[in-house]
């Protein structure tokens, strides 16, 4: 049983990337796309449960696509601390979305001792919605962070 394998089978990253490509075209000025994701892993033998929520953030004001994340999800505002995952013309799909989902899956998988206990674990993954916000990101490549700058129209 592998949490990463389960995520790969349903290919959550590909679904998100395709949605970004179709819903949020390159050269989209003054817009930020957020994707809320929840994951849950339950071991029914021990009643252990791991729950994680996070928000992926996409910004495409030119040919390049910025991908960031807010661990814990929530609402994106000017106070949100956005972790910089990638900013590329095409590699954003792997360096940003796929790599982060693999990292998240590995983190959750470490919560269970699969070799010792062989738990019965049920995994749930959910996209809790997409939201397009009016605004821009101030991206600091050196600190690998970004800040949302909302437009008046939000």
Image: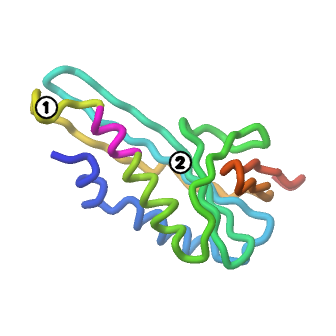
Which residue lies at the image location 17% right of the left edge and 27% below the top edge?
44
- The answer to whether residue 138 is above or below residue 25 is above
Q: SS class of the residue under badge 2? A: strand
Instruction: Give the image's coloring scheme.
Output: rainbow
Distance from the alpha carbon under mark 2 to that under mark 1:
28 Å
Of tags 2 and 1, the one toward the viewer is 1
123 left or right, relative to 133? left
Taken as a whole, is the magenta stretch helix, strand or loop?
helix
Q: Which residue is mark 2?
A: 36
Magenta span contains residue 114: no
Q: Which residue is mark 1?
A: 119
Q: SS class of the residue under badge 1? A: loop
92 left or right, relative to 47? right
Which residue lies at the image location 40% right of the left edge and 45% below the top edge?
104
Q: Which residues make up the magenta segment?
A: 104-110
Residue 141, position as x, y percentages in the image:
71, 57
- The answer to whether residue 141 is above or below residue 119 is below
First along the sequence among labels 2 and 1: 2
């Amino acid at each position: 049983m592998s949490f990463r394998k389960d995520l790969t089978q349903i290919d959550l990253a590909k679904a998100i990337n395709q949605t970004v490509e179709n819903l949020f075209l390159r050269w989209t000025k003054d817009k930020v796309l957020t994707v809320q994701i929840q994951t849950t892993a339950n071991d029914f033998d021990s009643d252990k449960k791991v729950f994680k929520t996070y928000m992926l953030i996409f910004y495409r004001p030119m040919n390049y696509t910025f991908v960031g994340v807010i661990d814990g999800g929530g609402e994106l505002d000017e106070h949100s601390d956005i972790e910089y995952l990638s900013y590329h013309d095409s590699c954003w799909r792997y360096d940003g979305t796929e790599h982060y989902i693999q990292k998240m899956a590995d983190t959750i998988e470490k919560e269970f001792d699969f070799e010792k206990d062989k738990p019965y674990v049920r995994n749930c993954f959910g996209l809790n919605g997409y939201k397009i916000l009016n605004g821009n990101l101030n991206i600091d490549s050196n600190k690998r962070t970004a800040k949302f700058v909302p437009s008046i129209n939000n």
